Image (tube, rainbow, N blue to C red):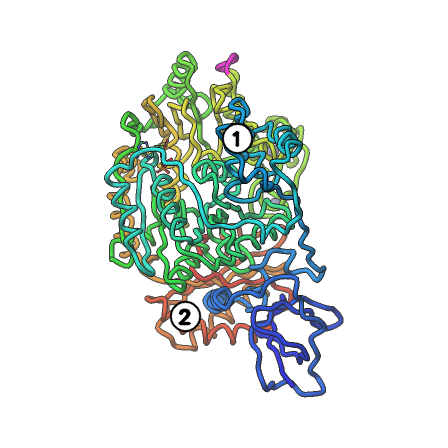
Amino acid sequence: MSFVRVALDVPLPTLFDYTVDEFVAPGMRVLVPFGRRQMVGVVLECINTTEVLPERIKTVSAVLYDSDPLSSELLKLLCFCSDYYHYPVGQTVLSALPTRLRSDKPLTTKSILHYRLTGKGVVLNMADFPQRKSVARKMIAKLQVHACTLAQLKRLSATASTQLQWLEREELVESFEATPLRAVPATNHSFENAHPLTSEQQLAVDSVNGIEGYACFLLHGITGSGKTEVYVHLMDSMLQRGGQVLMLVPEINLTPQLEGYFRSRFPEAVLVSLHSGLSENQRLHNWQLAQSGAAQIVLGTRLSIFAELPGLSLIIVDEEHDSSYKQQDGLRYSARDVAIFRASQCRVPIVLGSATPSLESYHNAQTGRYRMLKLTGRAQVDARLPTVGCINIHQAVMHEGISEKLLRAVEQRIARGEQSLLFINRRGYAPVLMCTECGWLSDCRHCAGKMVLHLQEQRLRCHHCGYQLRVPKACPDCGNAGLHPLGSGTQRVESILQERFPGARILRVDRDSTRNKRAWKTMREQIHANEVDILVGTQMLAKGHDFPALTLVGVLNPDSALYSSDFRAAEKLFAQLMQVAGRAGRADKPGEVWIQTAFPDHPLFRCLQNHDFEGWAAAQLSERQMAGFPPFVFQVMLRAEGMVEAEVYAYLHQARAVAIELKHDIEVFGVVPAVLARRANHVRAQLLIQAATRKGLQQFMREWKPLLDTLPTKKLRFSLDIDPLEF
Ligand code: ADP
Ligand code: ZN
Ligand code: ZN
């Protein structure tokens, strides 16, 4: 009899043994009985003996043949993640798969209508073909390379359908049914070269291309220095060698734009995207295109690091510092770090790109673990870096939080037909409502946070738990009618601007105004068509967008991050401000950035004014080294939350005591409340432990984790976070 060890989506750190009468191999999906249910699992091992008693062992119900087995490479990667992040192996393996592969409904791979040249079409002499039929010509040229679906042909022109009918009537093209995986040979590609590379770009491209096997590169290039162009050239060389390229990007928002851009540069290549915005079927389809090797370029958010890529030859992580690479629940992985592991496992190069690298990566590049590649100038000759200045809010004339100086600058832009962006990282009208008589504040009754005033909707809303109320007419405590909004959010800034510039076209971009799926796309089009004079927005606007008419950026309220209890807050602020500043003046118009602050002499703003990332990073790193913070130490955070405060703390104190007893060379901090000490009626607290080396931390974890699993947890929710980013 033979046995298999199966990974199942259950919160236990083990595999489950079953007998099986058919042939199976690791990586295959199986249906097995578990409790009273049938579950889909993945076979990780085939074995000859098992410790499960013969009368207790169950049999695999079915071996699923509707998808190709997972490669041993991917299984190894997933086991590494389970091990490193101390997350149950079954949940790790299954959470990496597209939803459709996790369900017990059989997959039907639908065949799709494709088009190809007929015999007559193949021998057609293009010289005899009507010149004016330019769309039909393009379609024939494309079909000479490979068969296409209607969707692929439509990308050539909006009139593709009509032209296709004509070609079919002329018997030059015919349709046939095929499953998409087989239909697309991925051998050739063409590459649209855009500009000659600058010498720095060329050096970067040559360095990566010169590598055999694994190496990690940090491409540090200021905004507008042409990092994307470096990626495109690297992709070109990898595709020429017949390899697959995986490119990770931080946000779904960015993928449709980038996808279009890469398609225009590689018109023949098979390019797929992988992100949570796709339908389940689309995601499965794209995943399978990657798995079959047909997809040459895979563009995706963090989850795409777990795509099957048999021909992987390069990984690119754009905006590598971005915190959305870190998953904040379930398997708390960093897609960037997993990407580095995967590259070394597959012996391929990896490029981490950013204008503001994370201090971890920057430190690694300085100490020689990574290789530094620098782009120090803007790629377009006439594009200059913006000038950055501070406005001291204690000395300036202010109007409800916006300085007269900044308002004047906006006014100038309106007169010149240019765009301004006011950046404030807070949505809603005001972060809190206050009673001027008794000092009542709009606390959330379920959380330790404040309810945010949303004036348009006349609501107070908690951004942590979603609880909302109508805005009270009078103070709930003393009955006074004088309730005042404190501070500003995007809505308030919008209304101040509306009052001051009644004729201006103002667009607010935050999570509220873009809740509708299409909204953000429409807004981007409006911005590009110059139908907007002033943009008011949160960090959504800071990332990767190219708005050519934008020449002024005002930063309204950055100070809270300067003295935050989170030691990474300043690093994040610097990166964010550098990114927003990078939005100004990209084309031929010079940009101007004004930061409103109470601390104009703070080193962060000084470095920003001089566009001095190096200086900033050096100062931060030496501070971190003195304080004993990452990247000089390695951390794990145990978080717990529950309805009863005493239980939460008792659990964490026990966990702490157990950790100390192990007598490892680690530092165990005290149990402390989370930054938001109560959320949705749950008390939240945490325990931080750190070690001087990654290895030391892992050795400790291997002993501590099994002990943690034995602690009574009652009804607590708890999680382990290795290399935590948020405090
Ligand atoms: P980054 O990603 O580093 O912010 P981009 O790749 O978006 O920069 O490049 C900024 C602009 O410079 C783009 O408009 C791009 O087309 C242009 N560009 C890139 N490389 C070159 C080059 N070698 N010569 C001229 N223009 C370039
Ligand atoms: Zn009151
Ligand atoms: Zn709340």
Depicted 337 relative to depicted 278: above or below = below
- Kind of residue at badge 2: Gln
Q: Residues within 10 Å of mark 2 (few under 14, many from 20)?
A: many
- For numbered disc 1, what is the local secondary structure? helix
At which x and y percent is residue 416? 39, 13
At which x and y percent is residue 148? 58, 42
Depicted 80 relative to depicted 50: above or below = above
Quadrant where ligand 2 appears: top right
Q: Which mark is residue 137?
A: 1
Relative placement, left or right, of 564 versus 212 is right
At which x and y percent is residue 392? 33, 28
Q: Which mark is residue 58?
A: none
Residues 498 and 126: in front is: 126
Which tag is nearer the camera, tag 2 or tag 1? 1
Q: Which mark is residue 698?
A: 2
Q: Residue furthest right?
A: 36
Image: magenta residue range: 500-504
